[in-house]
Image (spheres, grey):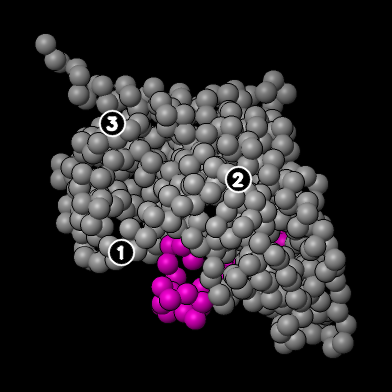
Amino acid sequence: MANSVILAQLKREQILELLKEGKRLDGRGLEDQRPLSIDVGVIPKANGSARVRLGDTEIVTGVKIQPDKPFPDLGDKGILICTAEILPLADPNAEPGPPSEEVIELARVVDRGIRETEMLDLHQLVLIENKSVIGIFIDSSVTDANGNLFDACSYASVAALLSCTVPKYEIQNEAPVLVEGVTSKPPVKTIPVSVTMARIGDHIIIDPSSDEEACMDARLTITTNTEGNICAIQKGGIDGFTLEQVIRCSEIALSVGTKIRKQLEKLM
Amino acid sequence: MTQLMNENGIRCDGRRVDQLRNISIKVGVLKNADGSAYIEFGKNKILAGVFGPRDVHPKHMANQDSGILRCRYHMSPFSVTERKNPAPSRREIEISKVIKEALLPAVILKDFPRTVVDVFIEVLQADGGTRCAALDAASIALADAGIPMRDLVSACAAGKVADQIVLDINNEEDQEGQADMPIAYMPNLEKITLMQLDGILSPSEYKKCVQTGINGCKLVYEMQRKALMDKYFTNET
């Protein structure tokens, strides 16, 4: 335990020295992302799926679509729920059992990014108002945890959604019945892109690795939409940001987001 | 659907766009806690109690080099319109985490290795903006407990309602408005320690919203400071 604390301090000093020269431990520049690869349709039993690798971080996400009852106060909208789980095989420190604070935050930040950008037109998923709607469940499993799970889970969730097919349901005797062999594309309105930045000393870096996360001062995740708006934010970490830094971060999120969105658009 | 703003720019609860709800703060309201505060922030009623530095249980959580901070944000079952299940929800667990991370930059725990400072927050009545009001109370409760601090943490939300950037979103504006951005700020160190956003803002609206939120935090700070002064520096000769 004490050893890992000393190691983290030594690594922080090394990381800070490199950052002064505009370099990072793995050779990246401050605003360089690790290589991002996205494969869709990897789980044919799901209605949509994706495997995303962001550097050494790996996520498998599946989308399941099935009829459901609407939320009592949202009878004119379909259901959208994102979850995330760090599998025990993904990290030596992960344990099976109830989700930790970190995992709950991860799932809620991924969910917020997709919900608040209004990626899907949920009004199009209503079968009978207030009674029967289509539910879209997006479940992400972290299979290898090596930093920046927020963005990796977000890209995997968005990729799985973009590539999913929505089965058709018909109402018979007031109950939804599956129409075999008929599917449609999901009602996508915009593409959310999450960009996570870490502040280490006075430096802002994007896409932090595990080593960088272990010694960062603060973290900011900003999700933008296709139209260039800022739609969801989550600050984390043990310290804060200045006003100038959060404005700078929004500019980085918009410019980096545009590049990643091009990669995601190809999946439509 | 309620009208959120009239043609004169007055909001549904009678406030201007840059006006806070009424706030009252009492320091030292609990006998057992080492530090405590009670805040009424509009219709929000929130208690915060602080214990520690004290022994850590379970022991494996202890840090040999520093004290640790723990935080629990909880809503009473009767605090909202529909009864809330008393078990902690995923929302409450996330809010507990962001509140802890908003307070951590302010507290100095280096001198209390192997101990914990526990912050317990109970929302007795909720009416929009509970995490900010809770943070305001928690920050004062920490000061009341005598925990060394670099600054107070002041929190307030800004947002977008009827296409305008407004300060301090209430419950109706949170439900039906266009964006909600809770912010916590250390006014003397000029640092943002909590920042979240739900809703769609253009880059220029985003800048205005952050600035509006920070201005609100500075107003809240004056009230926090006054509450502490009233407890510790009145009746002194």
Q: Specify start and end residues of the magenta stretch as a single range.
A: A76-103
Q: Nearer the viewer, residue A175 or A18?
A: A18
Marks 1, 2: nearer the viewer: 2
Tag 1 near tag 2, CB within 8 Å: no
* Residue drawn at point x = 72 percent, y = 87 percent: A45
**Tags 3 and 2 on a common chain:** no
**Tags 1 and 2 on a common chain:** yes
On whether residue A92 falls in the magenta region, the answer is yes
Mark 1 sits on what residue? A3
Q: Label 3's element?
A: strand
What's the amino acid at mark 3? Lys
Question: Which quadrant: the C terminus of chain B?
Answer: top left
Horizontal side, residue A194 vs residue B91: left or right: right
Q: Is residue A227 above or below residue B183?
A: below
Horizontal side, residue B176 vs residue B15: left or right: right
Q: Residue furthest top?
A: B237
Chain of the residue where label 1 is placed in the rendered structure: A
* Residue drawn at point x = 59 percent, y = 50 percent: A23
Horizontal and vertical percent for residue A107?
A: 56, 64
Mark 3 sits on what residue? B26
Q: Is residue A159 above or below residue A203?
A: below
Q: Nearer the viewer, residue A226 or A238?
A: A238
Mark 2 sits on what residue? A22
